[in-house]
Amino acid sequence: MRLAAMLLAVFVAAAGSAHAAMTLTSADVKDGAVVGKAYVHSLCGGENISPQLAWSGAPAGTKSFVLTVIDIDVKPDDFSHWIVVNLPPSTVSLQRGAIGLKAPAKVVANNFGEMAYGGPCPPRGSGQHHYQFTVWALPSPTVSIAPDERARVVRDALTRIAIDKASFTATYGR
């Protein structure tokens, strides 16, 4: 009987410390789908509008969020299309066409050298590229990322410090 009570106590403690998995969704870009022209970079004939994004399920202890959009097919270092840092923990979404974010949130220069969203724009003939949209829950209120930092370096650093993340991947080719 004692063993059963101990196991029950361990189970209850473990269940109490669990949190719902983080999720990231978009009304504009769907996991596994092709990115629509509105969200493609103007250099590739699109409108270069940032898509609407929403997330939920952040763990306790989240002090800020970072949002990244990275082309994971550009080798060897991937390619950043959008990096937003220092989003307050109360933030649960970004609207379509998000610009002029309220401090402390700020956009870091992407690998186009732009301080804004830069939609998909792979080289002609390079096939379908995969664009990974990720929201990272961080245990600190701010993070510093150098402008135009290599996307792989950004992703690796966030992987080391994030307490959770959620992502989906869409494609685009030309």
Image (cartoon, grey):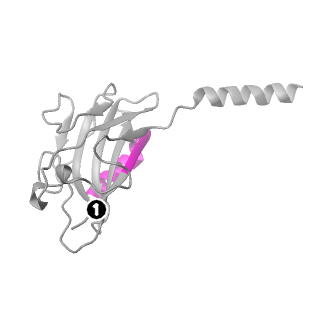
Where is residue 5? Give x, y as percent.
81, 25
Query: Which residue is situated farthest in the right direction here?
Result: 1
Please name the residue shown 27% across and 66% down the image. 74
Between residues 167 and 97, which one lies in front from this camera angle? 97
Determine which quarter of the picture holds residue 7: top right
Where is residue 46? Give x, y as percent.
13, 55
User: In this image, 164 relative to 63: left or right?
Assistant: right
Task: Please identify the quadrant where the N terminus is shown.
Answer: top right
Determine which quarter of the picture holds residue 174: bottom left
Please name the residue shown 27% across and 56% down the image. 151
User: Could you tell me what secondary structure mostly forms the magenta stretch?
Assistant: helix
Please name the residue shown 39% across and 47% down the image. 167
Where is residue 54? Give x, y as percent.
33, 35
Q: Number of marks in the image?
A: 1
Magenta stretch: residue 152 in it?
A: yes
Query: Which residue is situated farthest in the bottom direction here?
Result: 125
Label 1's element?
Answer: loop
Between residues 133 and 151, which one lies in front from this camera angle? 133
Where is residue 138? Give x, y as percent.
37, 36
Magenta stretch: residue 15 in it?
A: no
Q: Which residues are magenta?
A: 151-168
Query: Which residue position is annotated with label 1?
Result: 78
Please name the residue shown 36% across and 29% down the image. 63
Crowding at label 1, few (<14), some or many (≥20) Cα neighbours within 10 Å? some
Between residues 99 and 17, which one lies in front from this camera angle? 99
- Report the amino acid beneath label 1: Asp
User: In this image, 124 relative to 172: left or right?
Assistant: left
Whether residue 40 is visible: yes
Determine which quarter of the picture holds residue 140: top left
Examine the rendered structure and indicate whether residue 16 appears above or below residue 21. above
Whether residue 145 is visible: no
